[in-house]
Amino acid sequence: MRVRLSTAIAAAFLLSGGAFAQDAAKPTDPQIAHIAYTAGQIDITAAKQAIAKSKNKEVLAFAEDMVRDHEAVNKQALDLVKKLNVTPEDNNTSRSLAKQAADKQAELAKLNGAAYDKAYVANEVAFHKAVNGALGTLLIPSANNAELKSLLETGLKIFQGHEQHAEHVAAAMK
């Protein structure tokens, strides 16, 4: 119950404007690129921790999917920014995401077994809900470059599938 509550609070914080707070001006394409890449790296790091800690086959399969898919999307993002000669720009949102993720990783590192698995999967559900919400309501609408916007839209479809997969794994663990 504590894990669910902390996850719900984290998700509410993220969705209500915590990490994805919209500044007075909408984010620029270089900032959007950095935010999207940061979110992908966060999920790769979390998945690698799960692969090292979990013994649950469903959790491991999910984590392996996260590494594969997020590394592929991040590679596409890096290729695109090189092609466009754009330098991703660090910003308050990407820094906030990274800080929250580091805190969550430290919290999860203290858990083992089923407690870890449940907390990891619950965090993945909340994280994907927050990222998907930010992609749909802030990042995609704010993107000016058509190729960046298209990559973000493709990523959103993939990450919506991740959210559903995480929800399925979470439901199977109850």
Image: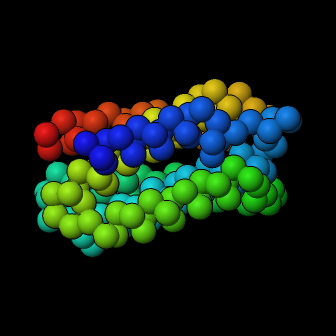
Q: Quadrant of the N terminus?
A: top left
Relative image position of residue 118 (x, y in whole percent):
23, 50
Q: Determine if residue 33 is in view.
A: no
Q: Residue furthest front?
A: 2
Picture layout, residue 67 above or below residue 142:
below
* 133 relative to 23 in the view: left or right: left
Residue at the location (31% across, 48% down)? 3
Measured as percent of width and height from the top left, residue 106 is found at 42, 68
Question: Horizontal placement of 15 versus 34: left or right?
Answer: left
Q: Quadrant of the C terminus?
A: top left
Q: Which residue lies furthest to the right in this view?
A: 25
In the picture, residue 26 is in which quadrant? Answer: top right
Instruction: Describe the colour scheme in one phrase.
Output: rainbow
- In the depicted view, which residue is nearer to us: 166 or 143? 166
Q: Give the residue displayed 69% in from the left and 49% down from the top.
A: 93
Residue 66 rendering spot, x and y as whole percentages: 37, 54
Identify which residue, 173 or 110, lies in the foreground.
110
Query: Tag count in the figure?
Result: 0
Q: Name the residue: 55% across, 57% down.
A: 100
In this picture, residue 95 sits left or right of residue 75: right
Asked if residue 27 is positioned above or below residue 33 in the image, the reply reads above
Using the image as rendered, state which of residue 95 and residue 150 is in the foreground.
Answer: 95
- Front one among 122 and 2: 2
Residue 103 in sight here: yes
Identify which residue is drawn at 30% across, 47% down.
Answer: 2
Residue 68 image position (x, y, % from top left) = 38, 58
